[in-house]
Image (cartoon, rainbow, N blue to C red):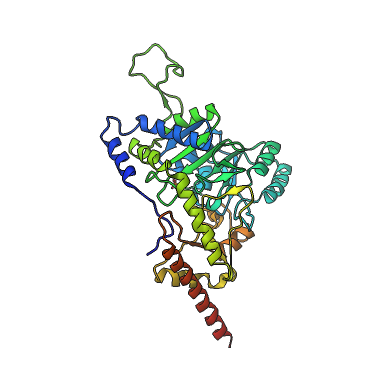
Amino acid sequence: MIPYGKQTICPADINAVIEALSSNLITQGPKVDAFERAVANKVGAKFGVATNSATSSLHLACLSLGLSVGKRLWTSSNTFVASANCGLYCDANVDFVDIDPATYNLCPQKLKKKLIVAEKADQLPDILVAVHMCGQSCNMEAINTLAKCYGFAVIEDASHAIGAKYQNQYVGNCRYSDITVFSFHPVKIITTAEGGMAITNNIELAKAMKNLRSHGITNDPAELKDTNQGAWYYEQTALGFNYRMTDLQAALGISQLTRLDEFVERRNQLAVRYNEKLDSLPLTTTTLLIDCKSAWHLYVIQLENPSYRRHVFDVMREQGIGVHVHYIPVHTQPHYQKLGFNWRQFPTTEEYYHAALSLPLFFNMTEDEQDQVVATLSNAISSALNARIKSKR
Ligand SMILES: *Cc1c(COP(=O)(O)O)cnc(C)c1O
């Protein structure tokens, strides 16, 4: 089976983890700090807060920005459930903004329309989570302008987009957002097995997230209420969690990060090659905006005729091609239906979903494997078209 995505682990990665495993501190040690500094430096931001997953980072980001019961978080529905669940964790109300059909990202024009309506109803959002679908940045400048105008905070869910660029700068510099979140799950661009990081230029947000990452506990003398205690003393100042990353994971992350640009470059080459090879087939590929360089976490095609998506998917899986579908619209999930959402609420997201198919794309993929994917796809589409012609006769 050619998987839709997989990690690349090299001997240097393995050695880095072995070295970390032999050191005194295998969690809460120096590797976590070093990884945080390395990622922040790489993307051009001030602070990094490493966690055990991007899901945890999104939760901490929302809490540090003051999201709580009765407040509102908006995101796009074309995403992994975690981008919206972080709002529910904080007992906030979650709502969605429809996407741009060309980039599959949250559409700033649709956002503006929704904000105008929300303002009249006195229901403006407190936080917007902008998801960089497939690895291409959202139009952050437009989103930032709206954020200033309507007074909401912005979190970039860049789980797909470490190493991507927007306006010639790395995604994650937080120029147009309060916090950016990365995921280091094995299918993403670089991995720590499980892991995530929240990036920010705001020291107060960074401090709040670090505090909440570890039970809401502090032993920093500058922060203690009671300074008249021994060295054992700490205070719990908020209800936090154990969302910590281990030093083993951080060591792997530091090693992986050194190859980030190489990983993204190869993914771009493979994406360009897919675009060329798929040109004559009845499907559309992702439109890239001029000021975006995608990290290409996912290579998604949209079939011209969604009625045979299931057939194409099944045929390709049977023939060993690990195609996938990203994403089932979050608002249609049973849990979200219980909250009152339903089909037909976000039509562009739903149309996109019915036609979407993710083709395998990973750093170590060979051109032969890629040709095999294209040939299998082409045959699967032909067999679907032939079956349709026969059934019409
Ligand atoms: C993978 C992913 C997440 C969650 O990442 P974890 O590190 O697995 O928690 C969140 N949002 C998006 C868009 C993702 O793709």
In the image, is 335 to the left or to the right of 234? right
Which x, y percent locates residue 27? 33, 33
Q: Can you tell which quarter of the image residue 303 is in?
A: bottom right
Residue 38 located left or right of residue 84: left
Q: Is residue 144 above or below residue 105?
A: above
Q: Residue 117, position in %: x, y?
A: 72, 47
Residue located farthest toward the left when viewing the structure as drawn: 22
Residue drawn at 67 percent across, 36 percent down:
151
**Compared to 322, does 129 lie above or below?**
above
- Indicate left or right for 16 with 368 as reference: left
**Marker count (numbered):** 0
In percent of the image, x 74 and y 43: which residue is there?
Answer: 120
The answer to which of 142 and 165 lies nearer the viewer is: 165
- Work out whether residue 115 or residue 68 is closer to the camera in this orientation and state it: 115
Can you see residue 207? yes
Q: Position of residue 50 (x, y in %)?
A: 43, 36
